Image (cartoon, helix red, strand yellow):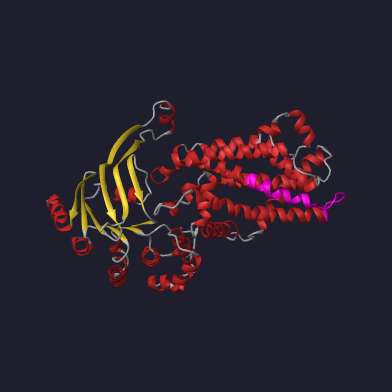
Amino acid sequence: MIIAILTDWFRRSNKSERLWLLAKIEFKLRYYENKLGLLWALIKPLMDIAIYYIVFQVIMRQNVPAFASYLFIGLIIWNFFIESTGGTIQILNTKKYLYEYSNMNKLEIYVSTLLSNSIGFFFNFVMFLLFYNLLEKDTNYSSLHTLWILPLFINLYILSLAISLILSNIYVIAKDITQLWTVFTSFLFFLSPIFYKLDTFKERLPTFDYLNPLAGIIINARKATMEGANPDIKLFAWDFTYAIVLLLLGIFLLNKLGSKAAEKL
Amino acid sequence: MTKALAIQAKGISKTFNISEDSHNTVKHRLFNLFNPPRRKKVEALKTMDFEIYKGECIGLLGRNGCGKSTLIRVLAGVFPTDTGKIDIYGSTLLMNLGVGMSHQLTARENIYVSASVLGLKIKEIDAIFDQIVDFAELREFIDTKIKYFSSGMVARLGFSIAVNAGADIMFLDEIFAVGDMKFQEKAIRVFESSWIEGKTVILVSHSMDVVQKYCSRTAFMKNGSLVYFGDTDKAIQMYIDDNH
Protein backbone atom coordinates (compact mmCIF):
# COMPACT_ATOMS: atom_id res chain seq x y z
CA MET A 1 0.00 0.00 0.00
CA ILE A 2 2.81 2.39 0.89
CA ILE A 3 4.69 1.46 -2.25
CA ALA A 4 1.53 2.05 -4.27
CA ILE A 5 1.17 5.49 -2.74
CA LEU A 6 4.81 6.33 -3.37
CA THR A 7 4.89 5.20 -6.99
CA ASP A 8 1.66 7.07 -7.55
CA TRP A 9 3.35 10.17 -6.19
CA PHE A 10 6.30 10.01 -8.49
CA ARG A 11 4.35 9.07 -11.56
CA ARG A 12 1.60 11.61 -11.17
CA SER A 13 3.13 14.81 -12.48
CA ASN A 14 3.86 17.49 -9.95
CA LYS A 15 3.74 15.74 -6.61
CA SER A 16 7.48 15.36 -6.05
CA GLU A 17 7.98 18.97 -7.16
CA ARG A 18 5.31 20.12 -4.76
CA LEU A 19 6.82 18.20 -1.85
CA TRP A 20 10.18 19.80 -2.48
CA LEU A 21 8.62 23.26 -2.85
CA LEU A 22 6.74 22.92 0.42
CA ALA A 23 9.86 21.58 2.14
CA LYS A 24 11.98 24.49 0.94
CA ILE A 25 9.44 27.04 2.09
CA GLU A 26 9.10 25.31 5.45
CA PHE A 27 12.87 25.34 5.84
CA LYS A 28 13.05 29.02 4.99
CA LEU A 29 10.30 29.85 7.48
CA ARG A 30 12.10 27.89 10.13
CA TYR A 31 15.56 29.33 9.84
CA TYR A 32 15.58 32.53 7.85
CA GLU A 33 13.03 34.31 10.00
CA ASN A 34 15.63 34.61 12.76
CA LYS A 35 18.55 36.97 12.86
CA LEU A 36 21.11 34.19 13.05
CA GLY A 37 19.37 32.08 10.43
CA LEU A 38 20.86 28.70 9.66
CA LEU A 39 23.46 29.14 12.41
CA TRP A 40 20.79 28.08 14.90
CA ALA A 41 20.73 24.64 13.34
CA LEU A 42 24.33 24.37 14.48
CA ILE A 43 24.26 26.32 17.74
CA LYS A 44 21.56 24.19 19.30
CA PRO A 45 23.34 20.81 19.19
CA LEU A 46 26.64 22.49 20.12
CA MET A 47 25.13 23.99 23.25
CA ASP A 48 23.53 20.68 24.19
CA ILE A 49 26.85 18.93 23.68
CA ALA A 50 28.57 21.44 25.94
CA ILE A 51 26.06 20.82 28.75
CA TYR A 52 26.14 17.03 28.62
CA TYR A 53 29.88 17.01 28.18
CA ILE A 54 30.37 18.97 31.37
CA VAL A 55 27.90 16.83 33.32
CA PHE A 56 28.90 13.38 32.16
CA GLN A 57 32.54 13.69 31.27
CA VAL A 58 33.83 16.38 33.61
CA ILE A 59 31.69 15.92 36.72
CA MET A 60 30.65 12.28 36.56
CA ARG A 61 33.74 11.01 34.72
CA GLN A 62 32.06 8.44 32.49
CA ASN A 63 35.20 8.02 30.39
CA VAL A 64 33.62 7.38 27.02
CA PRO A 65 36.24 7.82 24.31
CA ALA A 66 35.55 10.72 21.90
CA PHE A 67 32.61 11.68 24.04
CA ALA A 68 31.85 14.96 22.23
CA SER A 69 31.37 13.14 18.92
CA TYR A 70 29.47 10.40 20.73
CA LEU A 71 27.06 13.04 22.00
CA PHE A 72 26.98 14.92 18.69
CA ILE A 73 25.66 12.03 16.60
CA GLY A 74 23.22 10.97 19.32
CA LEU A 75 21.85 14.46 19.76
CA ILE A 76 21.28 15.25 16.09
CA ILE A 77 19.28 12.05 15.73
CA TRP A 78 17.34 12.86 18.86
CA ASN A 79 16.70 16.45 17.75
CA PHE A 80 15.42 15.33 14.37
CA PHE A 81 13.06 12.94 16.11
CA ILE A 82 11.77 15.59 18.51
CA GLU A 83 11.31 18.29 15.89
CA SER A 84 9.50 15.87 13.63
CA THR A 85 7.18 14.46 16.28
CA GLY A 86 6.56 16.99 19.05
CA GLY A 87 7.09 19.84 16.61
CA THR A 88 4.38 18.58 14.28
CA ILE A 89 1.59 17.74 16.72
CA GLN A 90 -0.34 20.80 15.60
CA ILE A 91 0.56 20.45 11.93
CA LEU A 92 -3.04 19.92 10.82
CA ASN A 93 -3.84 23.20 12.50
CA THR A 94 -0.96 25.30 11.24
CA LYS A 95 -1.09 23.92 7.70
CA LYS A 96 -4.84 24.14 7.48
CA TYR A 97 -4.61 26.59 4.60
CA LEU A 98 -3.30 23.80 2.41
CA TYR A 99 -6.20 21.40 2.70
CA GLU A 100 -9.08 23.64 3.69
CA TYR A 101 -9.80 24.74 0.15
CA SER A 102 -8.95 21.73 -1.95
CA ASN A 103 -8.79 17.96 -1.95
CA MET A 104 -5.02 17.78 -1.46
CA ASN A 105 -3.68 14.58 0.10
CA LYS A 106 -2.79 15.41 3.71
CA LEU A 107 0.06 12.93 3.80
CA GLU A 108 2.02 15.29 1.54
CA ILE A 109 1.97 17.93 4.26
CA TYR A 110 3.75 15.56 6.63
CA VAL A 111 6.23 14.27 4.12
CA SER A 112 7.25 17.78 3.10
CA THR A 113 7.62 19.07 6.65
CA LEU A 114 9.83 16.13 7.56
CA LEU A 115 11.77 16.67 4.36
CA SER A 116 12.49 20.18 5.56
CA ASN A 117 13.73 18.78 8.88
CA SER A 118 15.88 16.36 6.91
CA ILE A 119 17.71 19.27 5.29
CA GLY A 120 18.56 20.44 8.81
CA PHE A 121 19.65 16.94 9.79
CA PHE A 122 22.06 16.58 6.90
CA PHE A 123 23.47 20.03 7.53
CA ASN A 124 24.16 18.92 11.09
CA PHE A 125 25.53 15.61 9.91
CA VAL A 126 28.10 17.32 7.71
CA MET A 127 29.08 19.40 10.74
CA PHE A 128 29.44 16.20 12.72
CA LEU A 129 31.72 14.67 10.09
CA LEU A 130 33.90 17.79 10.07
CA PHE A 131 34.05 17.83 13.83
CA TYR A 132 34.80 14.14 14.11
CA ASN A 133 37.51 14.10 11.47
CA LEU A 134 39.18 17.43 12.16
CA LEU A 135 38.79 18.22 15.83
CA GLU A 136 38.32 14.96 17.70
CA LYS A 137 41.64 13.50 18.84
CA ASP A 138 42.70 9.83 19.06
CA THR A 139 40.10 8.53 16.66
CA ASN A 140 40.20 6.91 13.25
CA TYR A 141 38.97 8.87 10.29
CA SER A 142 35.51 8.18 8.87
CA SER A 143 35.36 5.06 6.74
CA LEU A 144 33.00 3.91 4.00
CA HIS A 145 30.79 2.46 6.70
CA THR A 146 29.61 6.00 7.32
CA LEU A 147 27.32 5.55 4.29
CA TRP A 148 25.19 3.29 6.49
CA ILE A 149 23.77 6.54 7.81
CA LEU A 150 21.47 6.66 4.76
CA PRO A 151 19.44 3.52 5.44
CA LEU A 152 19.54 4.36 9.14
CA PHE A 153 18.19 7.80 8.40
CA ILE A 154 15.42 6.39 6.23
CA ASN A 155 14.50 4.25 9.22
CA LEU A 156 14.50 7.34 11.44
CA TYR A 157 12.43 9.28 8.89
CA ILE A 158 9.75 6.58 8.66
CA LEU A 159 9.64 6.24 12.44
CA SER A 160 9.26 10.00 12.90
CA LEU A 161 6.66 10.25 10.15
CA ALA A 162 4.68 7.45 11.76
CA ILE A 163 4.71 9.01 15.21
CA SER A 164 3.99 12.44 13.77
CA LEU A 165 0.92 11.01 12.02
CA ILE A 166 -0.26 9.23 15.14
CA LEU A 167 0.15 12.24 17.45
CA SER A 168 -1.22 14.93 15.18
CA ASN A 169 -4.28 12.90 14.30
CA ILE A 170 -5.02 12.15 17.93
CA TYR A 171 -4.68 15.92 18.42
CA VAL A 172 -7.76 16.36 16.22
CA ILE A 173 -9.92 14.69 18.86
CA ALA A 174 -7.85 15.19 22.04
CA LYS A 175 -5.67 18.26 22.44
CA ASP A 176 -4.18 16.76 25.64
CA ILE A 177 -1.78 14.75 23.53
CA THR A 178 0.59 17.74 23.47
CA GLN A 179 1.18 17.60 27.24
CA LEU A 180 1.29 13.81 27.29
CA TRP A 181 3.91 13.72 24.60
CA THR A 182 6.08 16.26 26.43
CA VAL A 183 6.15 14.00 29.48
CA PHE A 184 6.69 10.91 27.40
CA THR A 185 9.63 12.37 25.49
CA SER A 186 11.45 13.38 28.64
CA PHE A 187 11.16 9.74 29.70
CA LEU A 188 12.34 8.60 26.34
CA PHE A 189 15.26 11.00 26.39
CA PHE A 190 16.63 9.48 29.57
CA LEU A 191 15.85 5.97 28.39
CA SER A 192 17.82 6.39 25.19
CA PRO A 193 21.57 5.85 25.04
CA ILE A 194 22.32 9.46 24.16
CA PHE A 195 24.79 10.36 26.88
CA TYR A 196 25.29 7.06 28.70
CA LYS A 197 28.10 4.71 28.10
CA LEU A 198 26.61 1.98 25.90
CA ASP A 199 27.71 -0.92 28.13
CA THR A 200 26.15 0.67 31.20
CA PHE A 201 22.94 1.28 29.28
CA LYS A 202 22.71 -2.32 28.06
CA GLU A 203 23.56 -3.71 31.45
CA ARG A 204 21.12 -1.66 33.49
CA LEU A 205 18.29 -1.55 30.98
CA PRO A 206 18.42 -4.88 29.15
CA THR A 207 16.03 -5.22 26.18
CA PHE A 208 15.70 -1.46 26.00
CA ASP A 209 17.85 -1.33 22.91
CA TYR A 210 15.03 -3.32 21.33
CA LEU A 211 12.07 -1.82 23.14
CA ASN A 212 12.98 1.76 22.32
CA PRO A 213 13.17 2.07 18.53
CA LEU A 214 15.29 5.20 18.77
CA ALA A 215 17.94 3.45 20.85
CA GLY A 216 18.72 1.02 18.06
CA ILE A 217 19.08 3.78 15.49
CA ILE A 218 21.48 5.73 17.72
CA ILE A 219 23.54 2.64 18.58
CA ASN A 220 23.83 1.66 14.92
CA ALA A 221 24.61 5.20 13.76
CA ARG A 222 27.55 5.29 16.17
CA LYS A 223 28.78 1.94 14.99
CA ALA A 224 28.72 3.13 11.39
CA THR A 225 30.12 6.61 11.82
CA MET A 226 32.53 6.25 14.74
CA GLU A 227 33.56 2.62 15.03
CA GLY A 228 33.86 2.04 11.30
CA ALA A 229 31.83 -1.13 11.64
CA ASN A 230 28.67 -2.51 10.09
CA PRO A 231 25.53 -1.85 12.09
CA ASP A 232 23.90 -4.60 14.07
CA ILE A 233 21.68 -5.95 11.28
CA LYS A 234 19.27 -7.73 13.59
CA LEU A 235 18.68 -4.53 15.52
CA PHE A 236 18.32 -2.55 12.28
CA ALA A 237 15.74 -4.97 10.84
CA TRP A 238 13.84 -4.88 14.11
CA ASP A 239 13.73 -1.07 14.17
CA PHE A 240 12.70 -0.90 10.53
CA THR A 241 9.80 -3.27 11.13
CA TYR A 242 8.89 -1.23 14.21
CA ALA A 243 8.74 1.92 12.08
CA ILE A 244 6.67 0.34 9.30
CA VAL A 245 4.11 -1.05 11.73
CA LEU A 246 3.75 2.35 13.39
CA LEU A 247 3.47 4.00 9.96
CA LEU A 248 0.57 1.74 9.04
CA LEU A 249 -1.13 2.71 12.28
CA GLY A 250 -0.43 6.38 11.48
CA ILE A 251 -1.96 6.13 8.00
CA PHE A 252 -4.96 4.34 9.44
CA LEU A 253 -5.44 7.19 11.93
CA LEU A 254 -5.01 9.80 9.21
CA ASN A 255 -7.85 8.26 7.24
CA LYS A 256 -9.98 7.77 10.33
CA LEU A 257 -9.43 10.99 12.26
CA GLY A 258 -7.45 13.28 9.96
CA SER A 259 -10.22 13.42 7.39
CA LYS A 260 -12.28 15.31 9.94
CA ALA A 261 -9.55 17.86 10.63
CA ALA A 262 -11.12 20.56 8.44
CA GLU A 263 -14.30 20.60 10.53
CA LYS A 264 -12.87 19.86 13.98
CA LEU A 265 -9.85 22.15 14.20
CA MET B 1 -24.01 11.52 -26.26
CA THR B 2 -22.72 10.51 -22.86
CA LYS B 3 -21.26 13.27 -20.80
CA ALA B 4 -18.24 12.73 -18.56
CA LEU B 5 -18.90 12.85 -14.84
CA ALA B 6 -17.27 15.49 -12.68
CA ILE B 7 -18.90 14.63 -9.39
CA GLN B 8 -21.14 11.74 -8.48
CA ALA B 9 -22.84 11.75 -5.10
CA LYS B 10 -24.83 8.76 -3.88
CA GLY B 11 -26.80 8.92 -0.67
CA ILE B 12 -24.58 11.49 0.98
CA SER B 13 -25.49 13.10 4.27
CA LYS B 14 -23.70 15.01 6.96
CA THR B 15 -24.45 15.54 10.63
CA PHE B 16 -22.41 17.74 12.92
CA ASN B 17 -21.98 16.89 16.57
CA ILE B 18 -21.67 20.17 18.31
CA SER B 19 -20.70 20.20 21.98
CA GLU B 20 -22.11 22.89 24.14
CA ASP B 21 -19.34 23.86 26.49
CA SER B 22 -21.11 25.02 29.58
CA HIS B 23 -18.24 24.36 32.00
CA ASN B 24 -16.43 27.63 31.78
CA THR B 25 -14.49 27.83 35.00
CA VAL B 26 -11.81 25.55 36.36
CA LYS B 27 -13.93 24.72 39.39
CA HIS B 28 -16.90 23.90 37.23
CA ARG B 29 -14.74 21.73 35.02
CA LEU B 30 -13.31 19.79 37.96
CA PHE B 31 -16.69 19.07 39.47
CA ASN B 32 -17.99 17.94 36.13
CA LEU B 33 -15.00 15.88 35.11
CA PHE B 34 -17.08 12.80 34.41
CA ASN B 35 -20.04 14.70 33.16
CA PRO B 36 -19.07 15.64 29.63
CA PRO B 37 -20.57 18.67 27.93
CA ARG B 38 -23.90 18.13 26.24
CA ARG B 39 -23.84 17.37 22.57
CA LYS B 40 -26.23 18.59 20.00
CA LYS B 41 -26.79 17.02 16.62
CA VAL B 42 -27.20 19.30 13.66
CA GLU B 43 -28.32 17.68 10.45
CA ALA B 44 -26.53 19.86 7.97
CA LEU B 45 -27.20 17.71 4.93
CA LYS B 46 -30.01 15.23 4.56
CA THR B 47 -29.55 12.26 2.28
CA MET B 48 -29.25 13.28 -1.34
CA ASP B 49 -28.04 11.92 -4.68
CA PHE B 50 -27.06 13.80 -7.81
CA GLU B 51 -24.55 13.95 -10.60
CA ILE B 52 -22.63 16.87 -12.04
CA TYR B 53 -21.04 16.58 -15.48
CA LYS B 54 -17.84 18.08 -16.79
CA GLY B 55 -18.17 21.58 -18.19
CA GLU B 56 -21.43 22.36 -16.46
CA CYS B 57 -22.08 25.56 -14.56
CA ILE B 58 -24.32 24.74 -11.64
CA GLY B 59 -26.06 27.30 -9.45
CA LEU B 60 -26.73 26.66 -5.79
CA LEU B 61 -29.46 28.62 -4.05
CA GLY B 62 -30.90 28.65 -0.59
CA ARG B 63 -31.29 30.85 2.44
CA ASN B 64 -28.58 31.33 5.05
CA GLY B 65 -27.90 28.20 7.07
CA CYS B 66 -29.56 25.80 4.67
CA GLY B 67 -26.39 23.81 4.12
CA LYS B 68 -24.94 25.35 0.97
CA SER B 69 -21.46 25.83 2.35
CA THR B 70 -21.43 22.39 3.96
CA LEU B 71 -22.51 20.86 0.66
CA ILE B 72 -19.74 22.49 -1.35
CA ARG B 73 -17.16 21.53 1.27
CA VAL B 74 -18.30 17.94 1.05
CA LEU B 75 -18.25 18.07 -2.74
CA ALA B 76 -14.79 19.59 -2.74
CA GLY B 77 -13.53 16.75 -0.59
CA VAL B 78 -12.69 18.99 2.36
CA PHE B 79 -15.27 17.42 4.68
CA PRO B 80 -15.88 13.68 4.72
CA THR B 81 -19.47 12.49 4.41
CA ASP B 82 -21.18 10.48 7.12
CA THR B 83 -23.07 8.20 4.78
CA GLY B 84 -23.02 7.46 1.10
CA LYS B 85 -20.24 7.78 -1.39
CA ILE B 86 -18.88 10.66 -3.36
CA ASP B 87 -16.62 10.41 -6.40
CA ILE B 88 -14.68 13.47 -7.42
CA TYR B 89 -12.96 13.37 -10.81
CA GLY B 90 -10.19 15.94 -10.77
CA SER B 91 -8.68 18.59 -8.52
CA THR B 92 -11.03 20.89 -6.67
CA LEU B 93 -10.79 24.45 -5.49
CA LEU B 94 -13.10 26.00 -3.01
CA MET B 95 -13.21 29.73 -3.16
CA ASN B 96 -14.93 32.14 -0.92
CA LEU B 97 -13.20 35.27 0.25
CA GLY B 98 -9.76 33.92 -0.51
CA VAL B 99 -8.28 30.58 -1.36
CA GLY B 100 -5.95 28.74 0.97
CA MET B 101 -3.08 31.08 1.62
CA SER B 102 -0.64 31.32 4.47
CA HIS B 103 -0.21 34.73 6.00
CA GLN B 104 3.37 33.86 6.89
CA LEU B 105 4.38 33.60 3.25
CA THR B 106 4.99 36.27 0.65
CA ALA B 107 2.69 36.75 -2.31
CA ARG B 108 5.25 35.05 -4.54
CA GLU B 109 5.47 31.98 -2.31
CA ASN B 110 1.71 31.80 -1.96
CA ILE B 111 1.30 31.83 -5.71
CA TYR B 112 3.72 28.93 -6.07
CA VAL B 113 2.24 26.94 -3.20
CA SER B 114 -1.39 27.42 -4.19
CA ALA B 115 -0.83 26.78 -7.87
CA SER B 116 1.18 23.70 -7.00
CA VAL B 117 -1.59 22.40 -4.76
CA LEU B 118 -3.92 22.89 -7.71
CA GLY B 119 -1.78 20.50 -9.70
CA LEU B 120 0.52 22.73 -11.77
CA LYS B 121 4.19 22.00 -12.33
CA ILE B 122 6.78 24.60 -11.41
CA LYS B 123 7.46 25.38 -15.08
CA GLU B 124 3.79 25.94 -15.73
CA ILE B 125 3.61 28.26 -12.76
CA ASP B 126 6.64 30.19 -14.02
CA ALA B 127 4.80 30.68 -17.29
CA ILE B 128 1.65 32.17 -15.77
CA PHE B 129 3.34 33.93 -12.85
CA ASP B 130 3.37 37.40 -14.41
CA GLN B 131 -0.19 36.98 -15.55
CA ILE B 132 -1.28 36.23 -11.97
CA VAL B 133 0.64 39.17 -10.53
CA ASP B 134 -0.63 41.66 -13.08
CA PHE B 135 -4.20 40.50 -12.83
CA ALA B 136 -4.09 40.95 -9.05
CA GLU B 137 -2.42 44.35 -9.53
CA LEU B 138 0.19 43.49 -6.90
CA ARG B 139 3.45 43.90 -8.80
CA GLU B 140 5.08 46.14 -6.17
CA PHE B 141 4.17 43.90 -3.24
CA ILE B 142 5.16 40.60 -4.70
CA ASP B 143 7.82 39.88 -2.07
CA THR B 144 5.80 41.18 0.85
CA LYS B 145 4.28 38.77 3.32
CA ILE B 146 0.56 38.78 2.84
CA LYS B 147 -0.07 39.38 6.52
CA TYR B 148 0.75 43.01 5.72
CA PHE B 149 -1.79 43.07 2.90
CA SER B 150 -5.21 44.66 3.14
CA SER B 151 -8.10 42.23 2.94
CA GLY B 152 -8.90 43.47 -0.55
CA MET B 153 -5.38 42.73 -1.72
CA VAL B 154 -5.50 39.20 -0.28
CA ALA B 155 -8.83 38.58 -1.95
CA ARG B 156 -7.54 39.86 -5.27
CA LEU B 157 -4.50 37.63 -5.07
CA GLY B 158 -6.68 34.62 -4.27
CA PHE B 159 -9.01 35.40 -7.09
CA SER B 160 -6.16 35.87 -9.51
CA ILE B 161 -4.56 32.54 -8.57
CA ALA B 162 -7.89 30.80 -8.96
CA VAL B 163 -8.56 32.40 -12.34
CA ASN B 164 -5.17 31.71 -13.80
CA ALA B 165 -4.24 28.41 -12.22
CA GLY B 166 -7.73 27.00 -11.85
CA ALA B 167 -8.72 23.54 -10.72
CA ASP B 168 -10.80 21.07 -12.70
CA ILE B 169 -13.80 21.71 -10.51
CA MET B 170 -14.31 25.15 -9.00
CA PHE B 171 -16.63 26.00 -6.15
CA LEU B 172 -17.30 29.70 -6.07
CA ASP B 173 -18.94 30.98 -2.95
CA GLU B 174 -20.08 34.57 -3.46
CA ILE B 175 -16.93 35.50 -5.27
CA PHE B 176 -18.22 38.51 -7.12
CA ALA B 177 -18.08 40.43 -3.89
CA VAL B 178 -14.28 40.66 -4.09
CA GLY B 179 -12.38 43.90 -4.55
CA ASP B 180 -13.47 47.32 -5.71
CA MET B 181 -15.77 48.00 -8.63
CA LYS B 182 -13.00 48.07 -11.17
CA PHE B 183 -11.71 44.70 -10.02
CA GLN B 184 -15.21 43.23 -9.97
CA GLU B 185 -15.77 44.19 -13.56
CA LYS B 186 -12.51 42.58 -14.50
CA ALA B 187 -13.43 39.48 -12.53
CA ILE B 188 -16.73 39.14 -14.31
CA ARG B 189 -15.10 39.62 -17.70
CA VAL B 190 -12.60 36.87 -16.99
CA PHE B 191 -15.30 34.64 -15.60
CA GLU B 192 -17.28 34.99 -18.80
CA SER B 193 -14.39 34.61 -21.18
CA SER B 194 -12.50 31.69 -19.72
CA TRP B 195 -14.22 29.98 -16.85
CA ILE B 196 -17.52 29.18 -18.37
CA GLU B 197 -15.79 27.18 -21.06
CA GLY B 198 -14.21 23.89 -20.16
CA LYS B 199 -14.29 24.12 -16.39
CA THR B 200 -16.87 22.67 -14.09
CA VAL B 201 -18.21 25.45 -11.90
CA ILE B 202 -20.51 25.34 -8.91
CA LEU B 203 -21.67 28.83 -8.14
CA VAL B 204 -23.16 29.88 -4.82
CA SER B 205 -24.72 33.26 -5.00
CA HIS B 206 -27.54 35.34 -3.66
CA SER B 207 -27.53 37.37 -6.82
CA MET B 208 -30.28 36.03 -9.05
CA ASP B 209 -28.90 37.86 -12.08
CA VAL B 210 -25.59 36.04 -11.88
CA VAL B 211 -27.20 32.64 -11.43
CA GLN B 212 -29.72 33.21 -14.20
CA LYS B 213 -27.08 34.40 -16.60
CA TYR B 214 -24.52 31.64 -16.24
CA CYS B 215 -26.05 28.49 -14.81
CA SER B 216 -27.40 25.72 -16.98
CA ARG B 217 -28.86 23.88 -14.01
CA THR B 218 -29.56 25.11 -10.53
CA ALA B 219 -30.16 23.45 -7.19
CA PHE B 220 -32.38 24.80 -4.48
CA MET B 221 -31.76 23.80 -0.88
CA LYS B 222 -33.88 24.20 2.20
CA ASN B 223 -33.05 23.11 5.75
CA GLY B 224 -30.37 20.73 4.63
CA SER B 225 -32.28 18.92 1.94
CA LEU B 226 -31.97 19.23 -1.77
CA VAL B 227 -35.48 20.30 -2.70
CA TYR B 228 -34.98 20.78 -6.39
CA PHE B 229 -32.23 20.29 -8.94
CA GLY B 230 -32.84 21.19 -12.55
CA ASP B 231 -34.10 24.10 -14.56
CA THR B 232 -32.58 27.41 -13.40
CA ASP B 233 -35.70 29.56 -13.74
CA LYS B 234 -37.77 27.15 -11.71
CA ALA B 235 -35.14 26.99 -8.95
CA ILE B 236 -34.96 30.76 -8.79
CA GLN B 237 -38.74 30.96 -8.53
CA MET B 238 -38.72 28.48 -5.65
CA TYR B 239 -36.02 30.48 -3.91
CA ILE B 240 -37.94 33.73 -4.28
CA ASP B 241 -41.12 32.10 -2.97
CA ASP B 242 -39.18 30.78 -0.01
CA ASN B 243 -38.02 34.25 0.88
CA HIS B 244 -41.54 35.60 1.15
* Residue B169 vs residue A199, the one in the foreground: B169
Q: Position of residue B184 (x, y in %)?
A: 29, 69
Q: Main secondary structure of the magenta part?
A: helix
Q: Indicate whether A94 appears above or below A168.
A: below
Q: x, y percentage for residue B20?
A: 34, 36
* Quarter of the rendering occupied by the N terminus of chain B: bottom left
Q: Is residue A116 above or below residue B17?
A: below
**Left or right: residue A225 compared with residue B56:** right
Q: Is residue B14 above or below residue A24?
A: above
Q: Is residue B168 above or below residue A201?
A: below
- Can the viewer see residue A126 in this picture? yes
Numbered label tally: 0
* Residue A257 visible somewhere in the drawing: no
Question: Could you tell me residue A164's position as x and y percent?
Answer: 55, 43
**Residue B168's x, y, as percent?**
36, 59
Does A136 appear in magenta? yes
Pick the residue in front: A247 or B102: A247
Magenta residue check for B224? no
A56 or A243, which lies in front?
A: A243
Drawn side of residue B100 relative to residue B176, left or right:
right
* Front residue (pair A100, B226): B226
Residue ID at (82%, 54%)? A135
Give the extent of the magenta segment: A134-156
Q: Tell me which residue sits at (21%, 52%) in the image.
A: B219
The structure residue drawn at horizontal position 30% and vertical position 47%, both measured from the top left corner, is: B9
Which residue ends up furthest to the front in the rendered image? B1
